[in-house]
Amino acid sequence: TDRDPEGFGKIFNGHEVEVMVMKRKADGKMGKNWLPGVVIAVSPADKEGKRMVAAKIDGGATCEVDLGYGALRRREDSRDIVTQREAMTVQKFRAKKDGLGLYEYMLKAQSVAVRSLALTTLCRLNQDSGLEYIRKWLESDFRRITSVSLRDAAHMLGSRGYIEEALALTKDFKEDIAAQLTVEVLAMAMNYTVHEEYDRLGENFQLSVTPEYGNPKLENIISKVNEALPLFGRLKSAVRRVTGNRQGLTDGFNELIFSCGRAFAVPLAFKALEWMEQLSIPKDAATYKAIGNNAVRRVSLLAKVWDL
């Protein structure tokens, strides 16, 4: 949050992170290792403002860590390929939350690594200025950026509801990877909006999604996601040709279907499921749980309408 001194920013299910775990090394000593993972749960803040984050790490294990104690970090490009001076300059802009300074530094940078680090840092500013300059960067004739930073930018834009701009970045990826990024952007857009509206409305959130009241912000995101789903049509052949592990696509669609349920957008959830089937993406236990969750939400919403 904005009160987070580490500048970690808001975190929701589906966010990619790195989790610090202690492992015994070959010499028998314990050392820390950073393992890639995906957030699967975030607890509400306790009385002291502390929160727990659960993440599924590579290998399938689930880790629970306290947020704000240095055991969780965003995934980003390695800083070993930039000089210490370049890294310190970027960090100075971040500490000052200077979006304009970062943006101008990124445009002047001669190396891909520095431009990418500056862009990733803009995505971490956790304020509107970072978003403002990412959108401004999109309008410029920008030079090459690493795929990790492009993905960060797409996630940032999508999570704030700028779905069209986020999906424009997928053109720089192979079609099967573009499909992965597309479903991630749509799921993050839905999740972010649901969390924002739930924080704003509290117990009145469910009432706001009934036809009698309506929730314009949520309805807008639902409409944008609905309009974006047919984009999978041009990616269908490439996705079907993938012969390796497609768990990432399964997880992405599962999260999208879950997020539709959280928004009480049940028809949209089943449209996402239809695209999952058209793309021949394998289902797992979480898929059926997401489908069941939507069925329950449908009944719950109908009960709410009858109570009015």
Image: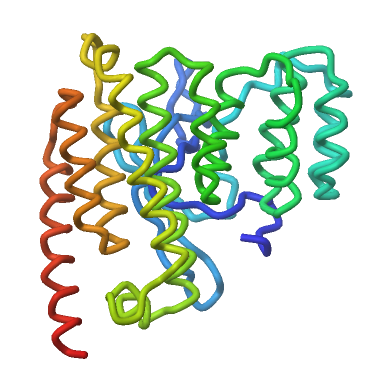
Provide residue 287's location: percent of width, then percent of height.
Answer: 16, 42
> Which residue is found at the position 71% from the left and 27% from the top?
117
76 displayed left or right of 211: right
Q: Nearer the viewer, residue 131 or 230?
A: 230
Provide residue 149's location: percent of width, then percent of height.
Answer: 61, 26
Provide residue 170's location: percent of width, then percent of height.
Answer: 49, 24
Give the quarter of the figure containing the N terminus: bottom right
Q: Residue furthest bottom?
A: 308
Query: Does residue 204 lie above or below 164 as drawn?
Result: below
Query: Does residue 78 lie above or below 286 as drawn?
Result: above
Asked which quadrant contains residue 88, the reply is top right
Give the quarter of the figure containing the C terminus: bottom left
Asked which quadrant contains residue 288, the reply is top left
> Which residue is found at the position 40% from the left and 37% from the top?
184
> Which residue is found at the position 55% from the left and 26% from the top?
169
Q: Nearer the viewer, residue 208 or 95?
A: 208
Asked which quadrant contains residue 292, the reply is bottom left
> Which residue is found at the position 18% from the left and 50% from the top?
290
Query: Does residue 148 lie above or below 110 as drawn?
Result: below
Q: Nearer the viewer, residue 59 or 142?
A: 142
Provide residue 96's location: percent of width, then percent of height.
Answer: 85, 49
